[in-house]
Structure formats: C-alpha cells, structure tokens
Image: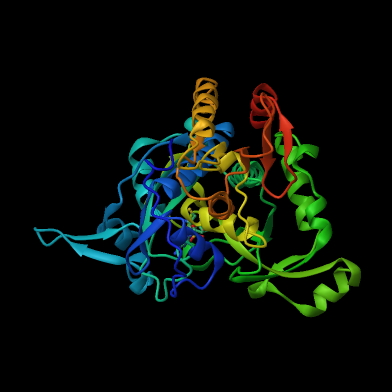
Amino acid sequence: MYITKLFIPITKDFPSEAKIKSHQLMLRTGMIKQSSAGIYSWLPLGFKVMKKIEQIVREEQDNIGAQEMLMPTIQSADIWKESGRYNDYGEEMLRIKDRQGREMLYGPTNEELITEIFRTSIKSYKLLPQLLYHIQWKFRDEVRPRFGVMRCREFYMKDAYSFDVDESSARNSYNKMFYSYLKTFERMDLEAIPMPADTGPIGGDLSHEFIIIADTGESKIYTDKNILNIKLKDYTFSPESLIKMRESFSSIYAATDEKFNNEDFQLKVKKENQMITKGIEVGHIFYFGDKYSKPLNGLIDSKDGKKVAVKMGSYGIGVSRLVGAIIEAKFKNNIMKWPKSVSPFDVVIIPSITKNNKENLEKAEKIYNFLKKQNVDVLLDDSDENMSNKFKKHDFIGIPFQIILGSKTQGENLEFKEINSNSELLTIDAIKSKIKE
Ligand code: 5CA
C-alpha cells in the first residue's frame, strides 16, 4: 500500500477528550473515529490491527478444539426472562422492541442463547464435551464509556462456551481455555497474568481475569513477581499437566483490588518480590456449572441413564479492547512499536524524496514490488514530506521495521532499522529474512 492512497486521516491536534495514550494515538493516527459516545468506526489502519488480533485469537481457540460459529447480535428477551437475568442485567442492557412489539435486546453476552441452541441439539453425554465460540459485536450501555476502545459501549468480543457431563470434565475444559489464553497473549508479545476474580453478573464460583501490566490500567494488582517466571512451555496439554499448570499459578499470591488482603500479601510474598502495579483486563473466564442449564432446561442423559443439567463455563476475550491495551503496553517515550504478529504492516519503506530527485522513490518502488511478491505486507511512504516529519509520523504508526532510503543507503546495501534500535546496512535478501524471522 502507498501511504498517499491509504485512508489514514492523521491529525496533529491533540484530541482533548482522550485521557490515555492509546485513545490519543488511535485518534491521531486515524485508527478509529468516534460515531457517538462509546461507539466507534474502525478505519483501515485500526481495522487491520484488530483483524490480526482476531485471527490469533481464532487460531488459538481452534488449537484447543473449540469450534467457531456465529450467533446474532440481536436476541429475544424471552430466553433472558427464563434464566432470570432480564431484570438482573439492569440498565447496561440495550432493550429494543420490534414492529410487532416483541421485546428484543442487543446481546451483552451469550450464555442464554448458546444454552438455548445446546438444549435443542444435544441430548446425550456421548456428544460431550463441546466447546463452541464466536467472535461478535456486543453492546453494554456502560454508565461511563471512556478511554476509547478500552471501555466502550459497542465492542468486539470472542466468547466461548463449554459443555461437559460432570464437574471434573468441565474443569478440564476450563484449564484448556486457561492455557489457550496464555498462548494467545504470548503470541501478541504480552505478559498476561491470570488473577482469581469475582464472577459478577455472569455468576459461578471459579473465575480468572487475564491482566496485562500497564500504568493506565483500571485494575490494581498485587502479586509476587515470580508469577512471571511460570512458563507455558513447561506444561503439556494433558489434563494432568494442565492441573499442574493451574496449581503453579494458584500457589503464587495474585489479587486484584476486589480480592486483595494486605495481611495475606505480607505473609505470603517476600518484600523484595512484591509487585504492586496496574493492569488491563483483556480476558475473563468463568466456570458456573448449571447456573444457566438448570433454569433453561439444558439437560442431557448421563452414562447411568439419569437426566442431568449440563455443566457450563464461558470464556471472553476483549478483541477490540486488546488493540488499545497493546498500545498501552508498548507505547513508550512517544514511540509506538507494534508486536510483529499484529502490526498493521510488516515493514515501511521511507524514501527521501525531493521535488527534483525522484531516484529514491523509483528505488523504493522496486523494493516494494520485490517484497510484495514475497508476501510481505509493505507500506511505502511516497509522500513528499521531509524525512524528519516522516520519521515522527512513523514513530506513531508503529510499524516495527523500516527501510530508509536516504543518505546512508549505499547501492545494494539498504539502511534497515527496527524501531528503538540502531540502523544497519543490509541487502534486500537479508532484510527479507529478518522480517520473516
Ligand atoms: N460472558 C462472559 C465471558 S464470555 C463475559 O462477558 N465476560 S466479561 O464481561 O468479562 O467480558 C469479556 C471481556 O470483554 C473482558 O475481559 C474485556 O476484555 C472485554 N470487555 C468487557 N466489557 C467491555 C467494554 N465495555 N469495552 C471493551 N471491552 C470490554
């Protein structure tokens, strides 16, 4: 893509409504545009990043055997009345009437709808366990939507649901999801800490939030820094190993504000290991047994012929929130550097172009075509701005690799730079290998 053709409305103004860096950066680089309070349009640059995040989430769900499906955004109020949550959910739920006067709503989550699908389709333990997920827009009429995509009203979420015949099998599904979440965030180059959590309006007695460390996070966290030393590669995917992985996490103190107890913290964590910081919740998982299957009659025939309520869990990842959360975690000293796996482009070519000298532009186009053929997603900054402005702009756009065609480039040896490192002179083949590494 040529930058002059890209719909990327960069603004130099500082948006006054944006209080945190991700919100500022997303507005300034034209990733999103607010359409009304807490509701955004995703412009090409922002949409590209979100799609990459979505694809990683999808692949890691598929890897644990979850099956993708798609449920609608608009739901009937009837099933919510059956579960008892129609009233409990309160004003956060956007309620709608259709032309026949039927009560509908814009789904804030999907426990009811998935249980309704399950109960009419699966009747026997023989077809269990099942893990289903979808990636769909949600609406919650938050009292105070703020921080851009971090706490908005319309947001994009991956929600998965597990169905098992008994509690021990259900806990294994929970552990698989736990593992998959750590893998998902690792692929985005994020350190996500699983924290025991309250279950709120979803319900149940077992729940974890996955929190990434960032100063601007809404959750305060208290933990032992050794929690960061638990490595996923030390565990396999067997049920026993997954239990061990969970035990390693539970053996280390970790609490958010809601669950924090100072006496416990002082007792269990050595002074030098105490980590008190802030973080952003990017995922939340729940095990709630038969909370929905009982009222909604999600019954199955068990092995010994009895009708039992299926045991369920639900598992959410804030796909759109992650775009902002990654910026919060990675934007430092006024420089953004996207993790390679989610960067809007793999590399940007920045040629120095003057009115009388288009030589660098021609050279840039040749490199651009070569890289395109190698399936590298390249951005070419063909604008006629001076180099200093171009560099400033790319510090914000945050593409991790740059090929700079200016005074340093000599013949076949091109100036190549990874953001936040020194540049080096490399041939185009060496550059290609670096990008694809
Ligand atoms: N039904 C469960 C699991 S599927 C559920 O809805 N959980 S949740 O309420 O915790 O939401 C899941 C994830 O969605 C959160 O971890 C967060 O990353 C994201 N999320 C929740 N509310 C918002 C919001 N207002 N704006 C942006 N992202 C949100």
Q: Residue 10, located in which quarter of the rendered image?
A: bottom left
Please identify the quadrant where the N terminus is shown: top left
x and y, in percent, of residue 85 in the image: 37, 65
Instruction: From the viewer's perspective, tell me whether residue 10 is left or right of residue 176.
Output: left
Depth check: 295 or 313 in front?
A: 313
Q: Residue furthest front?
A: 356
Rendered residue at 70%/37% (across/down): 239
**Displayed quadrant of residue 328:** bottom right
Q: Is residue 434 left or right of residue 150?
A: right
Percent of width and height locating residue 270? 90, 69
Q: Residue at x 45, y 46 (%)?
A: 384
Q: Position of residue 122 (x, y in %)?
A: 40, 36
Residue 95 appears anywhere in the view:
yes
Residue nearest the observer in this picture, 164 or 299: 164
Q: How many marks?
A: 0
Relative side of 228 to 61, left or right: right
Considering depth in this image, is 200 or 91 the residue closer to the camera?
Answer: 91
Can the viewer see residue 298? no
Query: What is the x, y in percent for residue 133?
Result: 45, 42
Query: Looking at the picture, does residue 49 appear above or below residue 78?
Result: above
Q: Which residue shows up at 62% across the image and 43% down it?
A: 400
Image quadrant assignment for residue 355:
top left
The vertical placement of 303 against 95, above or below, is: above
